[in-house]
Image: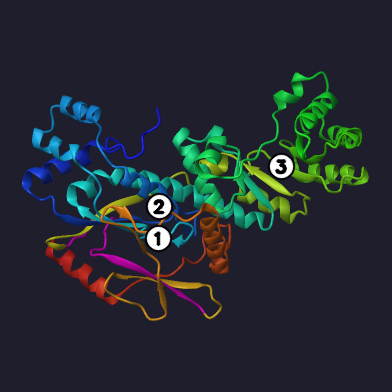
């Protein structure tokens, strides 16, 4: 069963037990939390922020159904006054966010949430889930986009993703990161994404011969269909495509592309390209798939493989080389003032913050400054934007093509060393402002 939008039960139990205690102690007063990633995975040089719109949509619909309240009552943990509070609970707070498609780095808030403490606490699990997963997939897709250059790639991952919700939001995140579309029809319907598909080997084997299969499919979809040619023998199938295209021409049916899903894709694409060109099908594109990632794609294109587009599945949807982000959600300020942890290896910075991005003379990103929200940084651009106030969104959600274009502009603005697909190298500089550093020392000293 998919989680319903705004379902208050999509939270960890300790969020509710803490909230119940806050309620009992009279501490349900405004508080600010930062959602951020402590450190980047070793295989990432940047993150591409994503998930803001799903997070805002969740907050807009936040509520506890009567059936949810009955379930919580059955646990025997919560007193009636707290359940009454939950029965009326809606999100009434303010949210600042890194815009989707913009770069983000370690310790920089992806979201800053200010709301009455019970509200801000119970949404932690949902916000971490939505922001971390979408940012993880969008960041992987951005790396695939860097490898592809001017070639297209499509999200082929739904059947490998970790559940239906992950597949649906993963398709959206992949598009933000640069995918041209998705194979998932539900994502096309939900988000207006372009949907793409070809055929499976089972279709080919259902017919008595490849020739019959190709003819039948092309006649069913006469406007530039894509034929899968590696079921039996790839080169022989490419020659069949030439024959089939000639036979179909008087009928007005055309072959737009062929797809190769196995074998050594570089040499296979070279031989198929030669066969198609010799047969007068120089306009037929070659699409490849089969456990691709950014490294395999980069290697194929560097070898000169004449590939026009890629279908990227498992490695994209699961972000296989970095399958999780260590996102956290920490209290940074409440009515009593700034708050912070000083745990070994897990210290947090106090106060409401803003991220300022400074560009170099070439227009590319040069450094970030993490500062208090009350500060400004000379020559910098503020990154966090207010997306909710009083529990309502501040502006309509941008169209996804606009978000994708922001992602493209972000990738173009990254320094060359961050665009590299290889791990290691010099990290992007994120500085802490003097006032923020001073405040952190003061808050930490109180608990020394």
Circle 1 residues within 10 Å: few <14, some 14–19, many ≥20: many
Q: Give me the C-alpha separation between circle 2 and circle 1.
A: 8 Å
The spot of residue 298 in percent (x, y) is: 67, 53
Q: Could you tell me which residue is drawn at 61 percent across and 57 percent down?
A: 146
Image-quadrant location for residue 18: top left
Q: Is residue 49 rendered magenta in the image?
A: no
Contact, CB < 8 Å: mark 2 with mark 1?
yes
The spot of residue 64 in percent (x, y) is: 24, 35
Contact, CB < 8 Å: mark 3 with mark 1?
no
Q: Could you tell me which quadrant the C terminus lies in?
A: bottom left
Question: Which label sits on residue 288?
Answer: 3
Element carrying mark 2? helix
Question: Which label sits on residue 52?
Answer: 2
Q: Is residue 353 rendered magenta in the image?
A: yes
**Magenta residues (range):** 338-360
Q: Which residue is mark 1?
A: 98
Element carrying mark 1? loop
Image-quadrant location for residue 9: top left
């Amino acid at each position: 069963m998919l989680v319903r939008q705004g379902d208050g039960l999509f939270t960890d139990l300790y969020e509710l037990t803490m909230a119940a205690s806050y309620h009992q102690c009279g501490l349900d007063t405004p508080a600010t939390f930062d959602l951020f990633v402590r450190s980047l995975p070793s295989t990432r040089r940047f993150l591409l922020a994503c998930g803001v719109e799903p997070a805002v949509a969740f907050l807009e619909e936040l509520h506890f159904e009567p059936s949810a309240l009955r379930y919580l009552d059955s646990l025997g943990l919560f007193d009636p006054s707290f359940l009454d509070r939950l029965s009326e609970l809606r999100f009434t707070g303010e949210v600042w966010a890194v815009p989707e498609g913009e770069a983000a780095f370690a310790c920089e808030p992806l979201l800053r949430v200010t709301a009455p403490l019970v509200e801000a606490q119970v949404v932690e699990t949902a916000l971490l889930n939505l922001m971390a997963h979408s940012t993880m997939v969008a960041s992987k897709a951005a790396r695939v986009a860097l490898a592809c250059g001017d070639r297209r790639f499509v999200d082929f991952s739904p059947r490998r993703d970790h559940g239906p919700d992950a597949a649906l939001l993963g398709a959206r995140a992949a598009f933000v990161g640069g995918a041209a579309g998705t194979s998932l029809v539900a994502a096309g319907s939900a988000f207006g994404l372009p949907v793409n598909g070809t055929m499976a080997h089972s279709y080919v084997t259902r017919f008595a011969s490849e020739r019959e299969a190709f003819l039948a499919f092309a006649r069913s979809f006469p406007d530039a269909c894509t034929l899968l040619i590696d079921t039996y023998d790839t080169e022989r199938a490419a020659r069949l495509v030439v024959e089939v295209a000639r036979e179909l021409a008087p009928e007005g049916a055309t072959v737009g592309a062929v797809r190769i899903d196995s074998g050594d894709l570089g040499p296979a694409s070279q031989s198929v390209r030669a066969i198609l060109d010799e047969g007068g099908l120089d306009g037929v594109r070659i699409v490849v798939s089969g456990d691709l990632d950014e490294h395999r794609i980069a290697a194929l294109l560097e070898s000169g493989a004449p590939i026009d587009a890629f279908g990227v599945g498992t490695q994209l949807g699961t972000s296989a080389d970095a399958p999780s982000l260590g996102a956290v959600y920490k209290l940074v300020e409440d009515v009593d003032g700034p708050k912070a942890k000083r745990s070994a290896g897990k210290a947090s910075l106090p106060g409401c913050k803003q991220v300022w991005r400074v560009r170099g003379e070439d227009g590319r990103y040069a450094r970030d400054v993490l500062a208090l929200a009350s500060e400004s940084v000379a020559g910098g651009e503020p990154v966090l934007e207010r997306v909710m106030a009083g529990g309502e969104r501040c502006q309509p959600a941008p169209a996804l093509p606009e978000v994708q274009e922001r992602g493209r502009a972000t990738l173009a603005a990254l320094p060359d060393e961050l665009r590299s697909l290889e791990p290691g190298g010099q990290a992007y500089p994120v500085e802490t402002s003097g006032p923020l550093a001073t405040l952190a020392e003061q808050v930490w000293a109180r608990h020394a």
